[in-house]
Amino acid sequence: MTDATVTSPAPTPARDDPPPALRLAVYCDFPYRRVDGRVHASDAFALFLDELARRVRGLTLVGRVDPRAGSAPYRLEHAAFAELPFYEALTSPARSLRTMAASLRRFSRVLDDVDAVWLLGPHPLAIAFALLARARGRRVVLGVRQSMDAYMRSRHPGRRWLWAAGAVLERAWRLLARRLPVVVVGPELAEQYRSARELLPATISLIRAAEIDDGPRPEPSDEVRLLSVGRLDAEKNPLLLADILAALNDGDRRWRLTVCGTGALEDALADRLRALGVDDRAELLGYVPFDGGLADRYRESDLLLHVSWTEGLPQVLFEAFAAGLPVVATDVGGVRAAAGGASELIGAGDADAAVAALRGLVDDPERREALVEAGRQLVRTHTVEAETGRIARFIAG
């Protein structure tokens, strides 16, 4: 068995290349919502896919729409949309499997009008869609954003049957990848999928070239402003933020934390901050749109703190790099290989290491400046224009 043919990143963005004359369908499992007649997504990756629509002749997103009342932050502007029957989650397999036949019929109709499909997985429907699209003679490209094994273990601790199911899905997806091209997010997944037929390691960036801030950064003052951005769910380990903040403010009450994000552990984080006596040093802002205040938070902060248990390559790191913000992040997933030279890395779950790294950066302006410049150089080669262009050309074959 030989290793995959790897398509390496271009050294400079190729934004002026003509887009492939490609009609593309993309499937990803996260739910969508219809808000005021428009399709919205709960996952920022949808914005990357919407930008990909500008690099091809036509792009149709395929996904399930949550019929319940509610909102989602990311509105689609450029992609068409094909709706699948809704199911709650794969953790309720009986209900989700009942929708599979109807989903296959709907996807078969989508195939009538496309040349290729990009299927994000591992996922049972993505496997079924791949087989159907191959049978219909369409070009099939797989996509992987994170390890299913690691995701299941962090998202569902103690539920061993889900761990086993995740391992089976991961194995099936890797077997399929031996015959099909694959786009993976980050170098760690590239190593795991090295036996794919063709392999493109990609970076999911939403940063436009015009958004990179080359201006000088202010020095930390009497108040050191930490920023954390991301979902407040188990795999993101948000309760550790409270422990770190408490340790930083032990005898030195100049540290302040702003948290932008929502999730199942939002209330638990607020309770933890109160229990440790640092709730007056923290702000929980919930979801903050990038163009609705988050970009300003990056520019106004002194340090970004990212403490996930598991990651592919988090978009928030690139947002921080573009703003010239020094980063302390856990050494998980593809972070070290893709962004380690531009970040201060710590072990996952290690509050003491986080405290030491943050205090060290505040006291070392030369190290801060080195990280800032490395981050800017990195994000310049991974703008949304460059990354969607590379993926479009790879899928077009």
Image: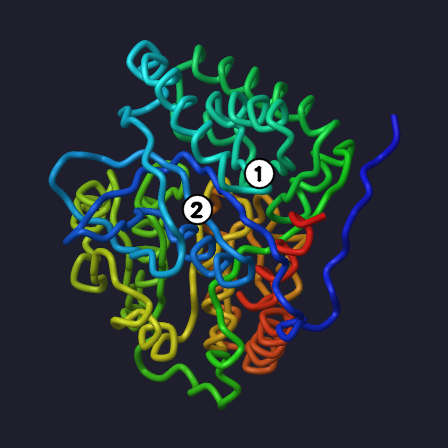
Please indicate whether residue 79 sits to the left or right of residue 143 in the image.
left
The furthest residue to the left: 69
Q: Position of residue 257 (x, y in %)?
A: 29, 64
* Residue at horizontal 67 percent and vertical 70 percent from the top: 17
* Residue at horizontal 55 percent and vertical 62 percent from the top: 55
- Front-most of residues 363 and 304: 304
Query: In the image, which disc is placed on residue 254?
Result: none
Q: Position of residue 349 (x, y in %)?
A: 46, 42
Category of crowding for the residue at label 2, using alpha-carbon neighbours closer than 10 angstroms: few (below 14), some (14–19), many (at least 20): many
Seen in the picture, residue 321 relative to 27 is either above or below; the reply is below
Residue on which the image places disc 1: 144
Total residue callouts: 2
Q: Which picture quadrant has residue 32?
A: top left
Please indicate whether residue 290 sits to the left or right of residue 204 in the image.
left
The furthest residue to the right: 2
Mark 2 in CB contact with mark 1 (< 8 angstroms): no
Category of crowding for the residue at label 1, using alpha-carbon neighbours closer than 10 angstroms: few (below 14), some (14–19), many (at least 20): many
Seen in the picture, residue 22 relative to 369 is either above or below; the reply is above
Tell me the element at label 2.
strand
* Distance between mark 2 and mark 1 Cα atoms: 19 Å
Residue on which the image places disc 2: 60
The furthest residue to the front: 112
Q: Which picture quadrant has residue 373?
A: bottom right
Q: Amino acid at mark 1?
A: Val
Please indicate whether residue 355 sits to the left or right of residue 76 in the image.
right
Seen in the picture, residue 365 relative to 69 is either above or below; the reply is below
* Residue at horizontal 44 percent and vertical 46 percent from the top: 60
Q: Amino acid at mark 2?
A: Thr
